[in-house]
Image (cartoon, rainbow, N blue to C red):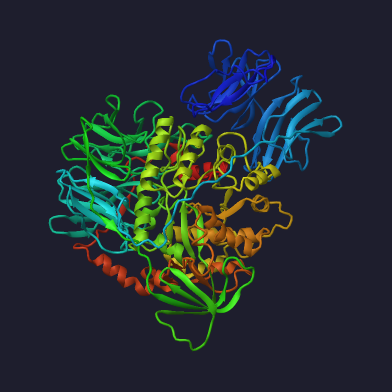
């Protein structure tokens, strides 16, 4: 508050943070800053003429001031680090602020000095400076793990209080007002006495009450395929190659598609050579994704890479002699097809798009994120061009300064064969950008026709563009934008089980009872449970009989927070098998590249792919900035409506909003989701709950609004959080990112480890190597325990806690069991923990009438485990067999393609190649220092940003 009573605040009205002022009663709001940058943390000068704030408008966060009368801006710091959270000295000339080196001060002449050096302990950080009225003392907050103290100069004046990371207000030289333990509190610095300022507020929450989408578990009808993945127009514009129903297809325009592959392995990213003779794609038939080249005249093909990792996203050079491709870490390579030599061109980039060649073969272009600053990870998805000879990288905005590509998946940039243009998607519409030979923009981008678009590809003469539009394949004139629909006559039927199976269960948990039943027969007719009765020896059974007399049969588990397509290209056939092997019968996506998700859902429904039942969705809807490659940036109501049109057309099972979407647009998304009968969730309990959202996808995760955190810096939660979830009957997903409860020997000796890709297998072994005993925290001093206790408070208040993992950020399969074990390890009963992945999960999706418990009439989603999971939750991970809708998957059958005894099958699959795989090698990239200035590309920096911001999906 300024000296005249006016209030300064950071407003978010247009989806970017700006500095505003208003009268004390909220009247006469006035915006002082604008533009595409973020302006935050305003503080009035003592005389009320100026407001200091932090902003990333200079390329990193710096301290700026704005003249209240004129709006003139002055940059007060320009160090390369991050300076933020300013505080005025009473003299009105000096500003304190948080910097990389600790808390610093800048004088009117620009000179700086350190007031409080950064702690040597990297886990300790300083926050929220404020000067005493006499200018002799500096208050700030010092935070380490689960401790946050109010510090005056270098002396902590609190002990054991949960001090919030807000600047203290000096009432006079001896008294402070600050926030701690969930209360407004005053402190007398002379006596140390404190007094809490009474405060309460009552408000109404909108209910979450809408008609749920009908999920037809008994469906056997014929469906048109909508999961047309990465369609690629042939150079002569007569054919299109694409992936659908877990296979690779080639289709004449307006003709019938021809299946090029017919197996359970995953084929991805088909691309034509410039002459149209060859088709390159990735497939995991040799165990991990490799590149294959198929001669379309002879249908003969050869495997052209055999590296240790995954090779995906191939792109032919214009002369056909090289393939660019990427690996599971986001590095980009160039393969010489004649010699087999592989050269790393660009080291790991976070979530890059697919590469595209310039017409002269000297430059590659692909989508990459360019953050605004190191303080916050979000930025814009831009065009990154790379000189193939030198490795030199250059970013180009896809249009206006703050424009962002719609995704970094399959939305371009795609270079036209004549080299004069790039096609890409911005604001979900197709754009064409004139470029020079090296990819430099040569004019403004032109919107092609205003249609919602994804996955563009060019004809060889650069005259036509093929793309997807809300599930339809469209072919447009690249000049006029006139477009027509290309029919794809491809259909499937859900693989709904038939026949009769009897399971003799030694023990049985139905998901409701707190005790096991023993020695029962479960009769499954088709996809549903017909009866559960006491077992009788000697009874004759028609159909298959499953002897589980030494096992416990229980409901299948649901992972209610996955991003199933985030690494599906790298996992291939392995991903679904891992989930099934660990007893996961359903997964719920809360954000994925939409056409990958649709293809996956249809492949699983049709039985073409092995895996759990998949509740799919598309990209989360975000605001003006994004981080992950599958987020949809929006800056207007019109853009949000385009994203929602895609959700309607492709039949999403939920819709997620992310951390920078303004509240009014969140409401629009939520209303549309509820009209569709599906839930909507975000990271924000507030404002989410206040605009009708169903719940949150984490208890605590990335946030950017600066308020309404569900956990404080010390991992403490207060009663209002539990009440908001409970009274609104809202859900929260318990994404506990942990491997601490997975035993080292247990993991190392588990045969299911063979299902993981080699690089993930090694990470899992390393992460669990030191786990000899389960963590214990009887006093609940750790952040992990406090989060689990907060989740218990939500459940006790009536909120719905569901289990999720954020897989593959957490480990697929084992991650869900690590979550359940942590819940139990910090106080939950096994019964209540297991229900977060069964009953609660089904209720959350509105499918509890069909799944979540095991009763006659329910769908036969069940697992067979060794041990008593109600007594020892660890037993839930000891899965011997999994049944999804009556389809039985034994552990051995799931492991078969990836165990040593069956290795010849993989070798035989690879041996179908008509030529030997070349002796592939990797050489050093052309210029090791070319990417050094792009700090955000380094995996360790990405990891640091993840930890620093408590980031999660």
Left or right of 804 in this view: 886:
left
On the image, which quarter does residue 9 sit in? top right
Residue 588 in picture, x, y percent from top left: 47, 54
Q: Position of residue 449 (x, y in %)?
A: 27, 31
In the picture, the quarter occupied by the N terminus is top right
Query: In this view, which residue lies farthest toward the bottom?
Result: 538
Across and down, in percent, residue 376 comes to: 52, 35
Judged left or right of residue 591, residue 39 is: right
Residue lying farthest to the top in this orientation: 70
Residue 138, by quadrant, is top right
480 vs 898: above or below: above
Residue toward you, 770 or 267:
267
Q: Is residue 929 visible?
A: no
Among all residues in the image, which is located at the extreme right?
191
Residue beneath the point at 29% across and 48% down:
230
Residue that extends furthest to the left in the rendered view of this protein: 297
Q: Is residue 573 visible?
A: yes
Vertical order, 726 against 406 (above or below): below
Percent position (x, y) of residue 155? 77, 34
| Residue 65 as seen in the image, left or right of residue 441 | right
How many numbered marks appear?
0
Q: Is residue 405 above or below residue 581?
A: above
Point 60% across, 34% down: residue: 706
């Amino acid at each position: 508050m300024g000296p005249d009573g006016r209030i300064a605040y950071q407003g978010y009205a247009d989806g970017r943070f700006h500095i505003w002022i208003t009268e004390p009663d909220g009247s006469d709001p006035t915006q002082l800053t604008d533009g595409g940058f973020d302006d935050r943390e305003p503080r009035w000068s003592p005389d009320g003429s100026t407001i200091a704030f932090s902003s990333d408008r200079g390329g990193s966060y710096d301290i700026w001031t704005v003249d209240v009368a004129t709006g003139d801006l002055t940059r007060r710091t320009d160090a390369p680090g991050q300076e933020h959270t300013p505080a005025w000295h009473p003299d009105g000339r000096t500003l304190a602020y948080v910097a990389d080196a600790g808390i610093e001060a800048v004088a009117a002449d620009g000179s700086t000095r350190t007031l409080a050096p950064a702690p040597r302990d990297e886990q300790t950080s300083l926050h929220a400076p404020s000067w005493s009225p006499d200018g002799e003392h500096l208050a700030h907050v010092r935070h380490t793990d689960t401790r946050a103290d109010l510090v005056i100069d270098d002396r902590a004046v609190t002990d054991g209080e949960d001090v919030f990371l807000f600047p203290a207000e000096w009432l006079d030289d001896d008294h402070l007002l600050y926030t701690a333990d969930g209360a407004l509190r005053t402190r007398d610095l002379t006596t140390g006495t404190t007094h809490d300022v009474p405060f309460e507020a009552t408000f109404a929450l909108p209910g979450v009450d809408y008609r749920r989408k009908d999920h037809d578990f008994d469906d056997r009808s014929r469906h048109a395929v909508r999961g047309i993945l990465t369609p690629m127009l042939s150079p002569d514009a007569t054919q299109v190659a694409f992936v659908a129903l877990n296979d690779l297809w080639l289709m004449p325009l307006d003709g019938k598609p021809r299946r090029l592959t017919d197996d359970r392995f995953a084929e991805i990213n088909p691309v034509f050579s410039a002459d149209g003779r060859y088709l390159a794609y990735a497939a995991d038939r040799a165990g991990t994704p490799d590149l294959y080249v198929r001669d379309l005249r002879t249908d003969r093909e050869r495997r052209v890479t055999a590296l240790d990792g995954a090779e995906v996203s191939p792109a032919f050079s214009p002369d056909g002699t090289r393939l660019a491709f990427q690996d599971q870490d986001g590095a980009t390579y160039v393969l010489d097809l004649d010699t087999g030599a592989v050269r790393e061109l660009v080291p790991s980039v976070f979530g890059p798009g697919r590469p595209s060649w310039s017409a002269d073969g000297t430059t590659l272009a692909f989508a990459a994120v360019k953050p605004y600053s190191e303080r916050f990870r979000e930025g814009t998805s831009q065009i990154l061009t790379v000189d193939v000879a030198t490795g030199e990288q250059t970013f180009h905005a896809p249009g206006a300064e703050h424009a962002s590509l719609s995704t970094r998946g399959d939305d371009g940039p795609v270079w036209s064969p004549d080299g004069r243009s790039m096609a890409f998607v911005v604001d979900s519409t197709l754009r064409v950008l004139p470029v020079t030979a090296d990819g430099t923009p040569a004019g403004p981008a032109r919107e092609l026709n205003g249609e919602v678009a994804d996955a563009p590809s060019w004809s060889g003469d650069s005259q036509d563009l093929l793309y997807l539009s809300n599930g339809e394949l469209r072919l447009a004139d690249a000049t006029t934008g006139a477009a027509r629909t290309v029919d794809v006559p491809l259909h499937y039927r859900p693989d709904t089980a038939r026949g009769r199976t009897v399971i003799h269960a030694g023990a049985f948990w139905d998901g409701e009872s707190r005790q096991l039943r023993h020695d029962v027969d479960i009769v499954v007719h088709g996809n549903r449970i017909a009866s559960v009765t006491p077992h009788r020896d000697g009874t004759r059974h028609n159909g298959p009989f499953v002897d589980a007399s030494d096992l416990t049969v229980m409901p299948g588990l649901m992972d209610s927070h996955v991003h199933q397509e985030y690494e599906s290209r790298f996992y291939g056939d392995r991903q679904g098998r891992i989930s099934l092997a660990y007893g996961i019968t359903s997964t719920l996506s809360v954000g994925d590249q939409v056409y990958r998700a649709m293809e996956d859902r249809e492949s699983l429904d049709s039985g073409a792919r092995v895996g759990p039942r998949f509740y799919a969705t598309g990209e989360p809807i975000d605001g003006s900035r994004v981080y992950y490659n599958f987020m949809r940036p929006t800056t207007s109501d019109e853009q949000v409506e385009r994203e929602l049109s895609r959700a309607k057309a492709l039949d999403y099972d939920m819709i997620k909003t992310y951390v920078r979407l303004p509240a009014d647009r969140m409401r629009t998304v939520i209303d549309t989701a509820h009209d569709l009968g599906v839930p909507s969730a975000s990271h924000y309990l507030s404002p989410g709950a206040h605009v009708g959202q169903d719940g949150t996808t984490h208890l605590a995760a990335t946030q950017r609004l600066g308020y309404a955190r569900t956990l404080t810096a010390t991992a403490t939660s207060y009663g209002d959080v539990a009440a908001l979830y409970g009274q609104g009957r809202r859900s929260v997903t318990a994404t506990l990112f942990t491997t601490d409860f997975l035993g080292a020997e247990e993991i190392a000796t588990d045969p299911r480890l063979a299902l993981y890709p080699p690089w993930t297998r090694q990470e899992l072994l390393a992460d669990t190597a030191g786990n000899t005993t389960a963590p214990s925290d009887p006093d609940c001093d750790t952040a992990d325990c406090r989060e689990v206790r907060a989740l218990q408070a939500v459940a006790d208040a009536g909120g719905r806690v569901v289990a999720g993992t954020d897989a593959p950020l957490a480990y697929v399969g084992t991650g869900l069991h690590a979550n359940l074990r942590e819940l139990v390890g910090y106080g939950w009963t096994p019964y209540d923990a297991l229900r977060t992945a069964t009953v609660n999960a089904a209720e959350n999706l509105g499918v509890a009438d069909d799944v979540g418990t095991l009763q006659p009439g329910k769908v036969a989603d069940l697992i067979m485990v060794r041990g008593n999971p109600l007594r020892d939750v660890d037993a839930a991970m000891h899965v011997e067999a999994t049944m999804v809708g009556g389809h039985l998957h034994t552990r051995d059958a799931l492991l078969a393609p990836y165990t040593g005894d069956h290795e010849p099958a993989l070798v035989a699959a690879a041996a179908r190649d008509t030529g030997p795989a070349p002796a592939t090698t990797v050489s050093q990239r052309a210029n090791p220092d070319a990417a050094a200035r792009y700090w955000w590309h380094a995996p360790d920096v990405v990891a640091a940003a993840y930890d620093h911001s408590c980031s999660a999906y």
